[in-house]
Each structure stands twice: as C-alpha cells, then as structure tokens.
Amino acid sequence: MAQKYHFCLLGLIFLSSLLTGSSGGDGAHVFISSGENVSLCCNNALPDCKSTTWNYNRFRHLAAVELIALGIKKTDTERHERLSLRSDCSLNIKNVSKEDCGFYSCRQYVNGEQQGTDACVYLHVLHVSEISAGRSVTLSCQLYSIDEVSCDDWIRSEGIHLFWVNQAGVKLMRSDSIYQILFSSDHCIVTLNTTFLIEVHNREWRCAVTHRNQVKTSVTYTVKSSDPVETEVSRTLFRVIVIIVEFAVFAAPTVILLQIICARRAGEFFSLTQSATIFKIAKTEDCSSYY
C-alpha cells in the first residue's frame, strides 16, 4: 500500500512540474492561431538582453533546443528565419505553425551563472484543416500543445475548452440536420461535419478556444464549395457544349464536302443551261437564213 502511494505521489509531482514549469512557478499560457505572429514575454529579463537565453521543448524528457543564446539568435535551427528578439527580450515568432507549440523558457546568465528562475511560457497553437469527400466536408479544429500533457489534463488544470461557433455567433454544442459535432479529448480535436446544401453555401464557421472562460483565439473558416444544384447545372451545360463542339468538329468536313459537291453541280447545271441557250440561238439564226 505504501509503495502504491509512493508511485502516485511521484506521478503527481511529475505532472505538477509539467504544468508549472521547471522553476516551480506558474508558466504563462499563450494561445495563437496558425499563420499568425506571436510574442512570448520574458518577465525576468535583464537590461540589453545580452544575458538572455531562450530554450524550447516539444517533449519535456528530451534535451532543450537553444533558440537564443546570450541575446544572439542561433542559426542552426529550422525556424531561425522566423525568430527574432525584441528590445524587451521577448521572443517573436512569425507565421506560427502547429510545430511551434510547446514549452519555452527564458533564462538569464551573468558571467556563466544563471540568475534567478526561468520565465516559462506554454505556447498553444490552434489549427483548422478541411477534408472534403463527395457532397460533405469535415472541418477539423485541433489545439496543439506540449505533447506530454494530455488534453484532459489541460481541461482539468487550466479550464481549456474547444468549440465551434456558427455564423450567428451561437456555440454549437449538439449535432442537428445540417452539421455534426464530435469532440476528442485525447488530442484536443473538435470536428464539424456538414453536407453541401444550399443552407451552408459560403457559410462561415468559427473554431474558438477559451482559457478559464476567456476566449483566447479563434479561426474563421468559410465553406466555399459550390451549391450542388448550380454544380449540376454547370456540369450539364458543359456536357451540352462538349457535344456541340464534337458535332461541329466531325460535321464540318461533311458540310464542306457537300458545299463543294453542290457548287460543282450548280456550275455544271449553269454550263449546260448556257450551252442550250447558245444552241437555241444558233438554231434560230440558221432557220431564218433559209427565208
């Protein structure tokens, strides 16, 4: 029994360290939509930022990646071109992607020794993707966070909530005849499935995330697929045009040939008529000569 209690206590300590940061203080939570720019604050910065070092972890059990070392940006990282350091030592990230989510720490060094505790930031990235299949479309909205903390833990400890909002600003909690809502707490994904109907043509849907009942960020997505009735009419018209073009292509030589034949026959008929007239005139002249 004592051994089980010991393992439970270790688990709670480990989870607490993940949620609060290595320094033991509460880490800041920043929520941003993919494609936007974000600035992560360094609350323990010293003047001129020459002592500031920014580290990044996607997995807490792996070694941290050094992004900024003593105020100088590292150039051996894949995203170094999107990183910059502000005058207040905050870390700027341009065009945020879902791969940027994770745990960031700002640390100060003076003469090679760490000063104070880390300023910790958890970056959560909201991303929406579309999957179309036939006459239906599925919008998947996912909140990407540090991988070693489950969505259930974030929900319980930080009150994070993910949901869809319709064009009228009404939160979609239940499915109806137009859309279906499905939430997966394992990966912080809320999906919206809808069918290409007249009612949803060019309709906007918005996925939002709240942290302790405050909206932090959202993504608006417009279903731009054509109305099925218009699509079917367009397809029918296209088929008719194709048939007309094909008929014109194949019929043109025949029409030209018929015109040539008719022209030749008309020419022959004109020649015969002209010859008959000349013969009649000549015959008349010959008869008159007898008198």
Image (cartoon, helix red, strand yellow):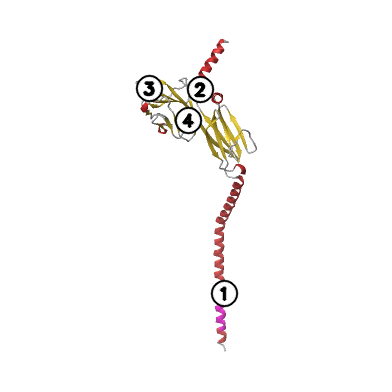
CA gap, disc 4 and disc 3: 28 Å
Q: Do the residues labelled 1 and 4 touch (CB within 8 Å)?
A: no
Foreground: disc 4 or disc 3:
3
**Numbered range of the magenta stretch:** 274-284
Identify the residue at horizontal 56%, vertical 13% (top origin): 5
Q: Where does the image place residue 148, in percent across and percent down from the top left?
A: 51, 23
Q: Which of marks 2 and 1 is nearer the N terminus?
A: 2
The amino acid type, in three-letter code, at marker 4 is Glu
Tell me, yes or no, whether the highlighted magenta stretch contains residue 280: yes
Q: Tell me how many marks there are.
A: 4
Foreground: disc 2 or disc 4:
2
Foreground: disc 3 or disc 1:
3
**Residue labelled with disc 3:** 109
**Residue labelled with disc 2:** 19
Q: Earlier in the sequence, mark 1 or mark 4?
A: 4
Residue 25 is tagged as: none
The amino acid type, in three-letter code, at marker 1 is Thr
**Residue labelled with disc 1:** 273
